[in-house]
Amino acid sequence: MDHKRITKYFLGVSILLFLLSNLLIDAQKFRICPVDPMGWDCRHLLSNSIGQPLFLGSLALSLIFLILRFLPSRYFSAWLKFGTWYIPLAAVIIIWAPVSGGDIFSFDKESITWFFSGLYVAVCLALILVQFLLGRLRGKTTA
């Protein structure tokens, strides 16, 4: 299977996860969670614990897969070496993070998700830039 088909598949999956995250964030609006008169409902659990991290993570993945879709296979190969260990590791750290921090110096699930999603996009863009520069350098030395 070529890299264009793989990136197209993963782009589709990340867009579906993005749509699912929007559904979980507004769980009460879509009648997934009933309204609790005591003030606590499953909306808090679905939105803060699952929806927000899934939203930010799938947005970062969609952006990178969209970019990789239009680049040559060497860019995808470089990304694959990074993405295969980074994505599961970041997901485990985000899952273990507390939903809300205890004080101003502690991290909650949302801030950790923002950090790891931003780091993922920055490192992926750096990998793409390095592959571009290496390709230009190889092209000049062989010409």
Image: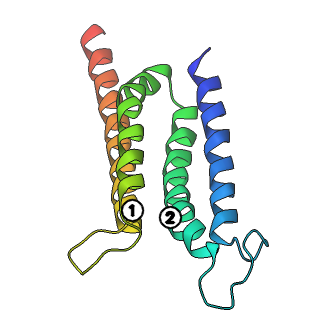
Q: Where is residue 27 in the image (x, y as percent from the top left)?
A: 70, 70
Residue 44 drawn at (x, y percent): 56, 75
- Say left or right for 139 vs 54: left
Q: In which quarter of the image is the C terminus?
A: top left
Relative to 25, is 81 above or below?
above
* Residue type, mark 2 in image: Ser
Residue extending farthest to the top is 142
* Front residue of 27 and 85: 27
Q: Is residue 67 left or right of residue 138?
A: right
| Image quadrant in which the N terminus is located | top right
Question: Of discs 2 and 1, which sits in the foreground?
Answer: 2
Determine the residue located farthest toward the front in the rendered image.
38
Above or below for 38 versus 131 = below
Kind of residue at disc 1: Trp
- Residue drawn at 51 percent across, 30 percent down: 71
The one of 114 and 63 positioned closer to us in this rendering:
114
Residue under the point 38% across and 74% down? 100
Along the line of sight, the residue nearer the viewer: 41 or 21:
41
Q: Mark 2 points at which residue?
A: 49
Q: Residues within 10 Å of mark 1 (few under 14, many from 20)?
A: some
Which residue was labeled with disc 1? 114
